[in-house]
Image (cartoon, grey):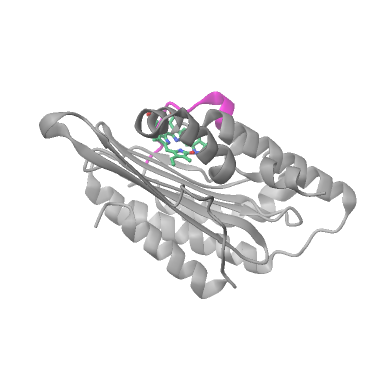
Amino acid sequence: MTLYQPFLDFAIATLQEHLDLQPYPIPEGFESKSAITGKGKRETEVLTTSYGYQSPKLRQIRAAHVQGGGALQVLNFVIFPHLNYDLPFFGADLVTLPGGHLIALDMQPLFRDDSAYQEKYTQPVLPIFETYQTHLPWGGDFPEEAQPFFSPAFLWTRPQKDEVVETHVFSAFKDYLKAYLSFVDQAEAVTDPSSLQEIEQAQRRYLNYRAEKDPARGMFTRFYGPEWTEEYIHGFLFDLERKLEMQP
Ligand code: DBV
């Protein structure tokens, strides 16, 4: 059992319980990928496994789980709603590197500076966010250009101990996911053409940013090569652009 496996198991079980969950196709060759890294006694396997689901309101629910021993563990888990809902993205980037843990957890807004939107999708999360401030303080040093994509309830923290991840971070992850599912439950389809256009624009903005700035690009390129990495990013992890191109 690795650090983030319980997070993944909880997420899938909870989604299954609350949603009409269907599989989301994972392109061939990307379900599971392994490479050997390091030399001699440092030789370790780095295994990346992918998970994909969808539901009537959620276009793509996907996870990438990287397992490379005690000094490299990642769970990147994102939910992309269908384009006819104003729902935020659920975004979790749980990263363990030799220097410690790096935790990003948020309901990433479509419209960061719209106060009605904040009222609807950030206010209800703030009490949960505040609950965790003592044990999971602000992690500092955050890319300026990423700011527009996060809400005021963005949980960004760098715990040193595994134990903090296993307890407080796991608990925050559960609370955020449950709160997200209650948003999904309440969400009603948008039909107004100009609102639909704004949603599509906001989704494209987010997608392009994440695909372009994916902080895992370097790591994946080192392990699996540039071709596999670019195809994984654009063909699975952040695939909206491709899916829209395929539509008539
Ligand atoms: N991040 C991803 C995907 C990953 C992944 C798909 C499957 O978006 C892993 C793997 N994140 C990952 C790794 C690192 C980070 C760091 C391996 C460490 C990179 C390194 O130090 O070499 C939030 N993730 C980060 C950082 C931030 C985030 C701010 C540290 C700063 C940085 O290196 O850029 N999550 C990340 C982010 C957004 C998000 C920028 C933007 C919307 O949702």
Dominant secondary-structure state across the stretch colored magenta = loop
- Residue found at x 30% / y 49%: 165
Res. 43 in view: yes
Taking the image in four quarters, ligand 1 sits in the one at: top left
Res. 151 in view: no
Residue 210, quarter of picture = top right
Q: Residue furthest front?
A: 28
Q: Is residue 36 left or right of residue 239?
A: left
Q: Is residue 6 left or right of residue 202?
A: left
Q: Position of residue 117 (x, y in %)?
A: 71, 49
User: From what the image shows, is residue 188 above or below residue 2?
Assistant: below
User: From what the image shows, is residue 87 above or below residue 17?
Assistant: above
In this orientation, which residue lies closer to the viewer: 126 or 234? 234
Residue 97, quarter of picture = top left
In this orientation, which residue lies closer to the viewer: 93 or 1? 1
Indicate the quadrant containing the N terminus: top left, top right, bottom left or bottom right: bottom left
Q: Position of residue 23 (x, y in %)?
A: 55, 64
Residues shaded magenta? 137-146
Q: Position of residue 114 (x, y in %)?
A: 73, 42
- Residue found at x 54% / y 29%: 213
Residue 79: say if magenta: no
User: From what the image shows, is residue 55 above or below residue 113?
Assistant: below
Residue 198, quarter of picture = top right
Residue 144: say if magenta: yes
- Residue found at x 67% / y 40%: 112
- Residue found at x 60% / y 55%: 60
